[in-house]
Image (tube, rainbow, N blue to C red):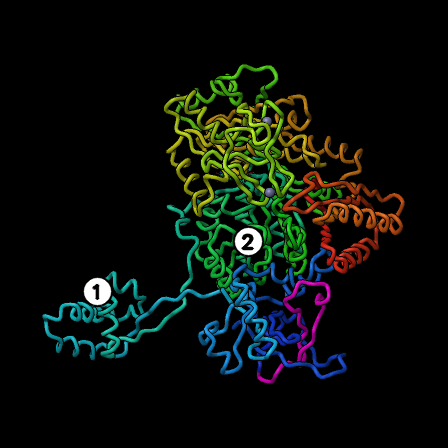
């Protein structure tokens, strides 16, 4: 038999199938990871097909071995990777790798192995191969070169598999109960520990095998006692695989009572249920105002799928951001839930993934990449907060989880539910055209009103403190809540916004030497930092340009607002949530739990706190600066602003108590802000569609962004113009080609970027043309050029 293999080298020349002969009695399947000889190297690859015959004329090489016990990819995922490779501009191997947990990606070590006795005795080796990546001493490098030349040593590539199963010792019994009773009689009473152990064995005979940790704890003996019992033949010891449990701590304290759906929820659920039961691949857009109970519709849908003996896949934005959601799913479906998200340790992630692959779970909840979960027999797919831009991966491979989900829904003959209070314009437009089926929840559960929203015009306002962050009105409103023992959520919009250093004498702004971005001040670490490449330097006390001491730090940070709040409202307990306070694993969850237990009055944070939170005691939401993102040079800046404000407003007044929202803005007359005030998505949709129509933007046009990067600015520009000419000569006249222009951030990590935006309605050959452009860029890569192609970009700056 012949295996079709995609080899683990991301390059144009290898982006195709290589054939190998499958040795007899080797259990290669589609989806297997294998080792294959490739030139002089031994590389990993994925089997994407198996056939009886080959077109290849010569003699095929044998596959070397199969890496995993079970093929890591299902045949569905293999097929999916083929489909994706045709649509997005990425190599098939990059797509296949993206489907696996990070730890499973192969790591190659280049080592030098001694061949002759002479070499083996050299101090360089000390008997072992040398890791060439770790070799830095020029003298040693010279020796290595010489050894290769004289063939006393050779270079080899070792593949490291970092994915490891966690094991623990388990003890089982070797005799029957009577024998232990006998032994127990013979052991003298002063052998205290042995007695303890034997008594335990006799009393808990049926409980065995038992894990070591548990035995030690229950009997109160050390591992030494257990090991000597093994030597005596009383116990057998064996390492068994155990799972790391990332859901520990998510156990719901009480099983929630079964909620009865209201009539709108019921109507939406019934439609979804029909598709689940008839196994129909239909896409639903569940448009429900904040607090309308979308989650309950999801959970009912999952139940309905399970009842049909099928499984469920649910995507949420960044799961660590919604511990409340995980808890609910876990409370409902218990042990059969697996979670996948970037907040887990690599080991935990791998274990969860294994449980899914081995069909030990029925429900998978996860962030973007969970859309590749090797779950079989899917009966429903759900994407919560479907408008979130994080569902699009903005690095290679640039896929959108929604597109992948649509493909999987067709493959599995199951419905896909896209839910949001503020659907993306594209999804809403597709529902208008009937491509998706629109389901609406127009009211909050129990007929609660949406909160009242007040706009405060920052151009004409009195500020409460010495800083220009908090208006008198907002401060007073916070005070009122504190007196009533209610809670407040305050959001500082970080989009398009940073704390930067400005010299009032010469106008100098401190920028990153590698990128074209201003450095951001971090008071806690005492550093000015580039958020893009990580460069940092100490906060200066004088202007680096003119030595003046008149430097100012502009912008506001959550830290500064926290200080001001504590000054204006002494005694107020403030919890801060931003990148700095959530860096450590689990801190997000801890902060939210503390706020939920009313250990603080105010939750102050960045966009992180805008979505999905459900705290009944929150009656006031304040937005400190609504509009920083409004003027970004992106066609979807209004959509993002409207969405953010509507979402954060939705956190107020979700239970019995009435909610209020105060939005501070410099642009109270802008339509995105005005419509966020009424939280009227449908009207916003109407207005924004007109704006997009006038500007020839999505969803009226499709878009592709081509970025050209080089260390040499001229080269980037020259190639960009060449690509534009090629596009112009081959595309329709009505297709719009914008650029090339330097990207809004024109230099990043010492690379200059130029970009071209193509807007089109119908271009049958565009895909082929773009692949061709990318391929020819590969050929000029030796001049340091890189071309990136992003289909339907979320950001065009
Ligand atoms: N039928 C119902 N009866 C009573 N309570 C309900 C019902 N459905 C949902 N709830 C409760 O209403 C609250 C809000 O629901 P949920 O969080 O699902 O809203 P949502 O639509 O997801 O809102 P958002 O978009 O703001 O996240 C939750 O506490 C939920 O338990
Ligand atoms: Zn930088
Ligand atoms: Zn200066």
Apparent side of residue 594 relative to residue 181 in the rendered image (left or right): right
The residue positioned 50% from the left and 43% from the top of the image is: 321
Establish if 428 lies above or below 673: below
Instruction: Please say whether residue 179 is visible from this viewpoint.
Output: yes
User: Is-magenta flag for residue 777?
Assistant: no
Mark 1 vs mark 2: which is more N-terminal?
Answer: 1
Rendered location of residue 120, percent (x, y): 48, 79
Vertical relation: 339 (above or below) 35: above
Choose mark 1 or mark 2, whichever is in front. Answer: 1
Task: Give the numbered dot on residue 304.
Answer: 2
Quarter of the image with the N terminus is: bottom right
Q: Is residue 2 magenta?
A: yes
Provide the secondary structure element on which disc 2 rests.
Answer: helix
**Quadrant (top left, top right, bottom left, bottom right) of the C terminus:** top right
Q: In this rendered view, identify the residue nearer to me: 319 or 626.
A: 626
Indicate the position of residue 684 as horizontal and vertical percent values: 69, 31
Taking the image as shown, residue 298 lies to the left or right of residue 255, namely right
- Residue at 48%, 55% (x, y): give it: 337
Crowd class of label 1 (few under 14; some 14 to 19; many from 20; radius 10 Å): some
Q: CA distance from mark 1 to mark 2?
A: 49 Å
Which residue bears the numbered disc 1? 221
């Amino acid at each position: 038999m012949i295996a079709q293999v995609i080899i683990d080298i991301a390059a144009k020349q290898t982006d195709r199938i290589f054939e190998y002969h499958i040795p007899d009695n080797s259990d290669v399947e589609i989806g297997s990871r294998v080792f294959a000889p490739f030139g002089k190297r031994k590389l990993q690859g994925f089997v994407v097909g198996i056939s009886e015959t080959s077109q290849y004329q010569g003699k095929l090489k044998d596959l070397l071995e199969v890496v995993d016990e079970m093929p890591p990819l299902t045949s569905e995922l293999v097929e999916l990777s083929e489909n994706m490779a045709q649509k997005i501009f990425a190599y098939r191997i990059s797509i296949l790798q993206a489907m696996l947990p990070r730890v499973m990606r192969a790591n190659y070590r280049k080592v030098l192995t001694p061949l002759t006795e002479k070499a083996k005795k050299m101090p360089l080796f000390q008997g072992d191969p040398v890791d060439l990546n770790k070799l830095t001493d020029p003298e040693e490098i010279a020796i290595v070169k010489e050894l290769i030349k004289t063939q006393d040593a050779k270079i080899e590539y070792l593949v490291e598999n970092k994915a490891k199963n966690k094991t623990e010792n388990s003890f089982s019994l070797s005799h029957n109960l009577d024998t232990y009773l006998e032994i127990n009689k013979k052991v003298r009473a002063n052998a205290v520990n042995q007695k303890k152990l034997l008594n335990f064995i006799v009393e808990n005979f049926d409980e065995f095998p038992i894990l070591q940790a548990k035995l030690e704890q229950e009997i109160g003996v050390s591992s030494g006692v257990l090991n000597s019992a093994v030597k005596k033949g009383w116990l057998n010891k064996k390492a068994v695989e155990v799972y790391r449990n990332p859901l520990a701590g998510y156990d719901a304290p009480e099983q929630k009572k079964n909620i009865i759906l209201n009539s709108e929820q019921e109507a939406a659920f019934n439609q979804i249920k029909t598709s689940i039961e008839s196994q129909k691949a239909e896409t639903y857009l569940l448009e429900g105002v904040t607090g309308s109970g979308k989650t309950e519709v999801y959970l009912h849908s999952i139940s309905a799928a399970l009842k049909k003996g099928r499984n469920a896949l649910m995507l949420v934005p960044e799961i660590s951001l919604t511990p409340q959601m995980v808890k609910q799913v876990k409370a409902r479906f218990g042990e059969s839930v697996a979670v996948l998200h970037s907040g887990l340790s690599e080991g935990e992630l791998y274990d969860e993934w294994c449980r899914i692959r081995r069909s030990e779970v029925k429900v998978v909840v996860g962030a973007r990449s969970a859309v590749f979960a090797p779950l079989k027999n899917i009966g429903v797919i759900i994407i919560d907060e479907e408008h979130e831009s994080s569902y699009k991966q903005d690095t290679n491979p640039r896929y959108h989880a929604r597109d992948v989900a649509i493909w999987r829904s067709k493959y599995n003959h199951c419905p896909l539910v896209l839910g949001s209070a503020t659907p993306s314009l594209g999804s809403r437009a597709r529902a208008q055209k009937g491509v998706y089926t629109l389901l609406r929840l127009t009211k909050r559960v129990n007929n609660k009103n949406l909160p009242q929203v007040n706009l405060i015009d920052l151009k004409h306002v009195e500020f409460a403190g010495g800083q220009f962050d908090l208006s008198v009105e907002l401060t007073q409103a916070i005070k009122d809540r504190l007196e009533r023992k209610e809670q407040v959520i305050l959001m500082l919009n970080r989009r398009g916004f940073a704390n930067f250093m400005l010299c009032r004498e010469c106008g100098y702004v401190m920028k990153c030497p590698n990128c074209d971005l201003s450095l951001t001040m971090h008071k806690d670490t005492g550093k000015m930092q580039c958020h893009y490449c990580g460069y940092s330097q100490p906060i200066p006390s004088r202007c680096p340009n003119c030595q003046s001491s008149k430097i100012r730090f502009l912008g506001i940070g959550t830290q500064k607002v926290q200080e001001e709040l504590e000054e204006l409202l002494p005694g107020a307990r403030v919890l801060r949530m931003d990148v700095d306070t959530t860096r450590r694993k689990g801190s997000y969850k801890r902060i939210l739990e503390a706020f939920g237990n009313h250990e603080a009055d105010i939750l102050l944070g960045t966009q992180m706190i805008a979505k999905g939170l459900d705290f009944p005691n929150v009656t006031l939401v304040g937005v400190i600066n609504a509009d920083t993102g409004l003027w970004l040079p992106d066609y979807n800046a209004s959509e993002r602003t409207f969405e953010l404000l509507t979402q954060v407003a939705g956190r107020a007044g979700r239970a019995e108590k009435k909610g209020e929202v105060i939005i501070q803005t410099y642009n109270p007359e802008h339509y995105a802000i005005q419509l966020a005030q009424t939280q009227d998505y449908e009207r916003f949709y109407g207005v924004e569609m007109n704006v997009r129509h006038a500007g020839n933007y999505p969803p009226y046009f499709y878009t592709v962004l081509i970025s050209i990067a080089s260390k040499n600015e001229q080269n980037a520009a020259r190639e960009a113009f060449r690509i534009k000419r090629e596009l112009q000569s081959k595309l329709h006249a009505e297709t719009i080609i914008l650029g090339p222009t330097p990207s809004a951030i024109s230099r990043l990590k010492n690379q200059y970027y130029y970009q071209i935006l193509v807007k089109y309605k119908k271009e049958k050959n565009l895909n082929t043309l773009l692949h061709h452009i990318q391929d020819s860029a590969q050929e000029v890569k030796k001049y340091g050029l890189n071309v990136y192609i992003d289909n339907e970009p979320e950001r065009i700056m």
